[in-house]
Amino acid sequence: MRSPYYKPQNGTHCTYTKLKPSAMPQKQKPSQTAHYIELGGYQYWPVLVPRGIRLYTYEQIPVFLRDNPYITDGYRAYLPSRLCIKSLFIVSNESVNMWTHVLGFLLFFCLGVYNMVSVLPSVGASREDYVIYSITLFCFELSMLCSVGFHVFCCHRSEKTSRRWMALDYAGLSIGILGCYVPGVFYTFYCNNYWRQVYLVAVLAMILAVFFAQIHPLYLSKQWKQLRSLIFCLVAGYGLVPTAHWIWLSGGFSSELVQVFVPRVLGMYSLAALALVFYISKVPERYFPGQLNYVGSSHQLWHLLLVLMFYWWHQSSCFIMAYRHSQPCPDAAAPG
């Protein structure tokens, strides 16, 4: 019986998906080596996929990959590390997740180079400024890479390997939050060395506590999913404490710097809150199951908003750094 699959004549290691009977060739050279694949429920969708990779429906994937039942197709699964990396270059329901943060990493890398050669020298930055900006952008870049790593290797045939990359993804999120705290605390308490050190130590202690919490065997389980979200909300929300303290030390909302900088802080928290709403609610695919498998799902919106939030905070940090250099600290309250 004639095979319902067709391999192109160009000799590549890729093949098209199942074709309609009317589109099948009448003759096929016997020297061809058949390479049969399916793409989940999209049996007639002409997508090139490397040899050894196929896409699965939600019901076909391992239990540990079943996180969002509203994404019904386009899953990668059962892959060794080599094919996980190759799958970065195919169309799957993780493609947008992977590439948004690949491009996010490139964005923050380019911003780092631009800062070092243009922005910081133009404001007469000190050695401390260079250190702070290096730490901040390194945290953002590492957060992006950890996310990319998880979304590339989550489809690994070993559940243990997939879980390890998930732990690294959560660690990357903590590192990204640290990257937001460092310039915020450093420049808001620029003229108060004592409180600057107190809050930097407190933030570092919280991030380390989250890292140690990941050692617990249930931390990455589905039963603890809500607890994980609560932990990250508390770590991120803690930033409102030093913000309120800084407003009080600065003389309240009558301060010019407070009036300009607080809206930027609220803007960052608004983006973070919106991203979290998409992440938890699984909207919009909840209302369009199976229709947003490849583009437009909640996790993809979460990724985009994270990149936007980090960029927003980077620009805000540049603003307050320039302000601090243009408005020196009063009396003997200068930093250090």
Image: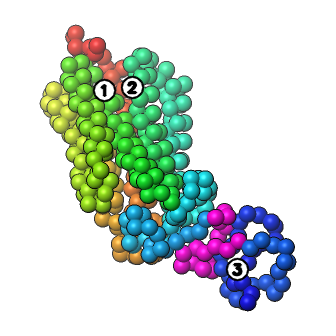
Residue bearing mark 3: 5
Q: Residue at x 64, y 70 (%)?
A: 47
Instruction: Classify residue 254 as left or right of residue 67.
Output: left
Residue 63 lies in what quarter of the image? bottom left
Question: CA separation, marks 1 and 2?
Answer: 10 Å
Q: Position of residue 230 (x, y in %)?
A: 23, 52
Tell which of 190 and 276 is nearer to you: 276
Mark sitting on residue 187? 1
Residue bearing mark 2: 132
Classify 10 Å Cα crowding around label 3: few (below 14), some (14-19), many (20 and above): some
Q: Amino acid at mark 3?
A: Tyr
Q: Which residues are magenta?
A: 35-52
| Helix, strand or loop status at disc 2 | helix
Q: Is residue 24 magenta?
A: no
Classify 10 Å Cα crowding around label 2: few (below 14), some (14-19), many (20 and above): some
Q: Say if mark 1 contacts mark 2, CB within 8 Å.
A: yes
